[in-house]
Each structure stands twice: as C-alpha cells, then as structure tokens.
Amino acid sequence: MKRRDVLKYTAIATGTILSAPLISGILTGCRSEVAEIDPYQPIFFKEQEFGIIKQLIDVILPKTDSPSASEVGVQNILDTMIGSVYEAADQQKWQANFSALLTKLNNDPEDETFKNVPKNITLKNIEKLRLEEYENEIPVKAAIEDLRQQTIAYYLSTKEIGTKFLNYLPVPGQYQACITVEEMGGKAWTL
C-alpha cells in the first residue's frame, strides 16, 4: 500500500470516529421533546433556610428598574460559594451567625421552625438590626453585614446585571483615566 493511501484511509477513519458522536447528537437533537431543567438544589442551606435567604436578599436588593437579587440567582451563587468554596470553620461560623439572625427575626427562641421570620423580613427590621447596638448580638450584626455585602457583590457580578445594567467592555480599549459617569452613558462599570 502506498503512503498516500495509508494517510487517506487514516484520515477518513479518524474523521468518521470523531464525527459519529457529533452526528448522533445532531440527529437526536431535533426531537420535539424539551428536557426539563431541574430547579436549583441547595448545597449548604436547608430548604426552609434557602427560602428565607431568597426573601432576605430581595429585601436588600428589591426589584426596581433592574431585576431583584433572587431574579438573577444571587441565592444560588451564595449557597454555592458557602457550600463549595468556604472552609469548614468558615461554614460553621456563617451558619452560627445566620441561625442567630433567624432566631432574632423569629422573636421566639423556643420556636425552631422560624414560623415568624417571613413576616419580620422587612427593610425596616433588617436596617434596625444592622444599625442599632445590641448587647451580645454580634452574630446577628455579622450575619446581616455578611449577607448584605455578599448579596451586593454577587448581584453586580452576574451576567445579566453586568451586561444589561452596567457598562461592559469585554475587550478593553484605550485607557481613559478621568472621565465622568455621564460620558459613559450614565452607567457605572461592571466588575
């Protein structure tokens, strides 16, 4: 067999082997059925805590002319970061502070189901807990501050907010040091 024939047959065989999965994916991808996407399953928080987190972040960043924090998935990012990135000691500290916040919002330390929390999640109540001085309430204040800071940071780093509500330049151009926000269309830069 000639060298050219060997190369030609090798190329055909390799192309066929590599193309088979792609072709089968294309042929089966034309089905009319749409696969169901499972809703997010919390990694760190329990289901009830996850619902309360969602309510809390929406109090911190409610829907205005831009989406609320939960609409862009901040609760999912928060849960993933704490559950996957934080070290065990940091997770325990976060959970202890968050439990203290839930107990304070519940106003009944004996009730561990946090039945009263949803009606106590208001901006007024959260700001009161954040700003007022309480003795032995350091975990509550720490939980509010952590949640507030992380909610804002994750919100500003989401794709939807970064591309639709902030200036976004994927490949930077010429550096301009001193320009006003008005010169950039009235929007701050995305992170």
Image (cartoon, rainbow, N blue to C red):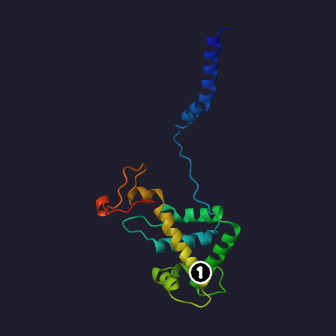
- Judge whether residue 43 can be spotted in this image: no
Question: Which quadrant does the N terminus fall into?
Answer: top right
Q: Residue furthest top?
A: 1
Amino acid type shown at disc 1: Leu
User: How many numbered markers are drawn?
Assistant: 1
Q: Dividing the picture into quarters, in which one does residue 167 lie?
A: bottom left
Q: Is residue 40 left or right of residue 125?
A: right
Q: Residue at x 66, y 75 (%)?
A: 93
Q: Is residue 129 above or below residue 74?
A: below
Residue shown at 44% from the left, 67% from the top: 68
Secondary structure of the residue carrying tag 1 is: helix
CA neighbours of label 1 inside 10 A, class few (<14), some (14 to 19), many (20+): many
Above or below: residue 148 compared with residue 186 = below
Q: Name the spot of residue 132 as percent of width and height, x first.
A: 51, 88
* Residue 39 locus on image (x, y percent): 57, 58
Q: Position of residue 174 (x, y in %)?
A: 36, 50
**In the rendered image, which residue does mark 1 sit on?**
101
